[in-house]
Image (tube, helix red, strand yellow):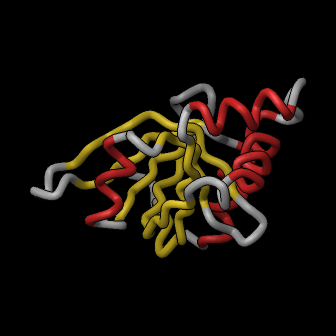
Amino acid sequence: MDIDLAREFVRNNHRAVLTTYHPDGRAQVSPVLVGVDEAGHAVISTRETATKTRNLAADPRVVLCVFTDAFFGDWVLIEGRASVVRLPDAMEPLVDYYRGVSGEHPDWDDYRAAMVRDRRVLLRVTITRAGPDRHG
């Protein structure tokens, strides 16, 4: 599948399952909401203290299975490498992420305070492969 087609799917469908890898190689799987930033990265908001964030420090590989709200039906698999953007650098990208996934927030000051309080980070995934290339 063309990576641009995968990006377009993610712009319109935000439910996903993210796989990162523990240092011993075991998979760690988390339900997430995913968006696409202006540079074409898949982006995910999470906490500094989350297992997935710690895993990415040792192994930046990720796999995302993105699907529609209906769950059954169309879906996209994305492989890539993630970097972790921490506060304060993450603040405006987190605002952009929220807008892309949920629209306008009723109180941006409250949102920004919650990002600090929750120690939020932004996972920025450079997409290296997308699929499926065929359905069977």
Residue 120, image quadrant: top right
Residue 103, given in percent of the width and then of the height, sits at 85, 35
Side of 96 relative to 132 (left or right): right
Side of 51 relative to 131 (left or right): left
**Residue shown at the point (66%, 55%) measured from the top left:** 88
**Residue shown at the point (53%, 45%) measured from the top left:** 66
From what the image shows, is residue 112 above or below residue 42?
above
Determine if residue 133 is in view.
Answer: no
From what the image shows, is residue 46 above or below residue 42?
above
Residue 124, given in percent of the width and then of the height, sits at 56, 62
Residue 38, given in percent of the width and then of the height, sits at 78, 66
**Residue shown at the point (69%, 69%) measured from the top left:** 40
Number of numbered discs present? 0
Near-viewer residue (134 or 45): 45
Determine if residue 16 is in view.
Answer: yes
Near-viewer residue (52 or 126): 52
**Residue shown at the point (38%, 37%) measured from the top left:** 30
Side of 8 relative to 76 (left or right): right
Residue 42, given in percent of the width and then of the height, sits at 60, 59
Near-viewer residue (56 or 39): 56
> Where the N terminus falls, by quadrant?
bottom right
